[in-house]
Amino acid sequence: MKFTLSWLKEHLDTAASLEAITETLTRIGLEVEAVEDRAAALRPYVIASVVSAEQHPNADRLRVCMVDTGSGEPVQVVCGAPNARAGMKSVFAPPGTYVPGKDLTLVVANVRGVESRGMLCSAAELGISDDHDGIIDLPADAPVGQSYPAYAGLDDPLIEINLTPNRPDCTSVAGIARDLVAAGIGSSRTPKVEPVPGSFPCPIQVRLDLEEDDRKLCPAFALRLVRGVRNGPSPEWLQRRLVSIGLRPINALVDITNFVTFDRGRPLHVFDATKVAGNLTVRRARSGEEIVALDGRTYALDEEIVVIADENGPESIAGVMGGEHSGCDEDTTDVLIESALWDPLNIARTGRRLGINTDARYRFERGVDPAFTVPGLELATKLVLDLCGGEPSQILLAGEIPERERAIDFPWSEVKRLTGLDLPRAEAKVILSELGFTVAGGAANERVKVLPPSWRPDIEGRADLVEEVVRIAGLDRVTSQPLPRIQPGVAKPILTPLQKRTRLARRELAARGLVEAVTWSFISHDEAKLFGGGARALQLANPIAADLSDMRPSLLPGLLKATQRNADRGYGDVALFEVGQCFANDEPEGQSIHAAAIRRGTAQVAGAGRHWDGSAGTVDAFDAKADAMALLGALGVSTGGLQVVPGGPDWLHPGRSGTLQFGPRNVVGSFGELHPRILKALDVKGPLVAFEIALDALPLPKYRPTKMKPKLALSDLQPVRRDFAFVVGREVAAGEVLRAAENAERGLIAGVNLFDVYEGQGIPADKKSLGLEVTLQPTERTLTDAELEAVSAKIVAAVAKKTGAVLRS
């Protein structure tokens, strides 16, 4: 909703500043979106007189004009407007002026061999309307040399507010002023509408041809004929009002209806009475009917749309837009003014169905004031008589104006109960009264009866009344109160261990350079079967798409497709992760939280992409394992009992994957390279590695009475590293050898690393050689040679006992 400050002050008597008004509007719920000071941008534009307009010597469509700008000698301007002529008044822009409609800054130019020192402007070039048919043609009494923004009222600040759908009363300037009066900004000066007596009965009748169930589509229809009018351009003050909010003046009759729409929130329509055949009928449109609307477009109608029709067919789309055939023009002498009530829901459906957005639709679909139906017609009649002359008929009213007697029993204590604001009853009563509510009972009464005004269809109960009181009184008056503690002492943790792990998992995976993805919880049936799902119980009864038919058993299908979409757009080296729900069955316990990640191409932890030294290789199963182990460590899961078993589920490569488990009955996840069969089925290209861990299956950390971290112990002594080469059976996993070495002497061994695997000459065919680097960290004193030999012997003995390995000679 847009309006100017001067227009607002036609309804509001106030000395408040623009800043105070806009701050108050936002405070009471009418949020100010923008305040536009157009005077600054248009300040260089002045009123000028065209002294002469001669044909350009080198161009048929150009004229060379001498322009009096009121500041000295006339200025030569080359103009291409068809209406440029000697003696007219227009708007002049000197060189150096920015023209918003053309997005350029004027300079002294040579136009076909003739110098031009400025520009005569159209309304479109100034950005104040869409009219670009010619330069602005001002009245003969326009003062030459005066600032055009000041003359045209464009120096008036333009205020735009964002209305919520429940405030139809503020789709008018008068309604906005009413709220400001209640907020104490000023007093109301909205003039009362006086009835205009009619001289004769309205000769055109109206029939509401609606079934009993359809009466709500048009409860009331008021009509009046004014004959003998003189239609033409509207007066300057009215054109200024409309131009200031971005509307294009058309003619006096149409401009009057637009003015009443914005000034009082009452949409009207005018018919040229001489173009109406017979009487008017309000009915549902018939299938196959069409209408050429005022926008020049032809609209196909159906039975869901309500129309105003004469004997020849539809003349107007009810509440949305009039028809071109019966529109008013400069030849109109007799005019029918219509003021009707329409069903908001039907108007909204009609507008959406036809794709029409108008100011009338905007108001009708929110609900206009039913009590202002006839007064709105009276106001329009008075304006027509004042501006166009004529003789009015009596008002014809078909149907009845609905009366909503919905008195609300309102205890004053509701204000404090619902908001905490302890407001004096007398102040609350004044607020409601200023907003137009009728309060039966005084401030001394515990409860009163409140009757909402006809322009507030959104008020239905006590809470609505409380909202009105508090928004005007000010939410800043509601004092903050601390919530009482439910129990004394330190509050118990709110998040469950699984919730904490979910958050930690996201943070850890993001810290490893993976980008979070959020994919659908639904996948296709074929994809679900590839990843161990596809059960009938997990098929959706009403899927939103054919390829989203099953609940996902794994996060990997969605991540795989997301990875390929990135690759198709040139981002092949991509690393994605997701933490979300997976579904094993349709029971509550079948739902679990998984964490999964995928790396593609060269998207390793160390970085992705090609490099001149060739160091960036493609990802492999160990990158996925590193991600999985890092996640387990970040979640505080002890990996002492974790077993890494070769091989994984069917969707992973059997020789390049592993399963993570705490014993054979507690499998927590898997990692490895994706199986080529899966990649082919999903039309995904590798290399791709991934891991997936079920966070629900991870063992919970042991309870500790305190969460304090252990004391940091750093040794000042130099660590000692010793290498061992063990020959062990090929079937023995390297992890078993590592664990055996670690457990040989826990007090001294700080780490064991596998640095070599060898099979071939010098090693039996059923054996392999594993090279281990063992780091010994003394804490009390430097180790002697004898002590080092003793630790080495323990390591060799422990590995031999656990795995059967022997030192390689």
Image (cartoon, rainbow, N blue to C red):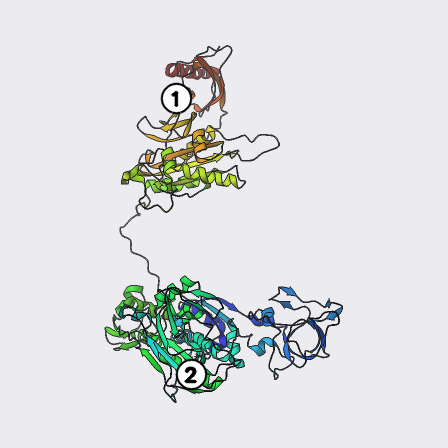
Q: Which mark is residue 766?
A: none
Task: Judge from the rendering whether residue 347 lies leftward or rightward of residue 408; answer left or right.
Answer: right
Percent x, y of residue 78: 70, 72
Write the residue at 39% across / 40% down.
Answer: 579
What amino acid is at disc 1? Asn
Q: CA distance from mark 2 to mark 1?
A: 101 Å
For the residue pair 48 and 220, the one nearer the viewer reads as 220
> Which one is earlier in the sequence, the residue at label 2 or at label 1?
2
Q: Residue at x 49, y 69 (%)?
A: 295
Q: Secondary structure at mark 1?
A: loop
Question: Which residue was labeled with disc 1?
Answer: 743
* In the depicted structure, whether residue 654 falls above or below residue 228: above
Q: Which mark is residue 381?
A: 2
Comparing 378 with 19, the one in front is 378
Q: Quadrant of the N terminus?
A: bottom left
| Residue 270, position as x, y percentages in the image | 44, 77
Q: Residue furthest bottom?
A: 199
Q: Is residue 675 visible to the viewer in this orientation of the structure?
A: no
**Within 10 angstroms of label 2, few (less than 14), some, or many (20 or more) residues?**
many
Image height of 728 relative to 491, above or below: above
Quarter of the image for residue 226 reads bottom left
Give the residue at x 57% y 30%.
615
| Residue 585 at x, y percent in the picture | 29, 37
Tell me if 6 is positioned left or right of 139 in this view: left
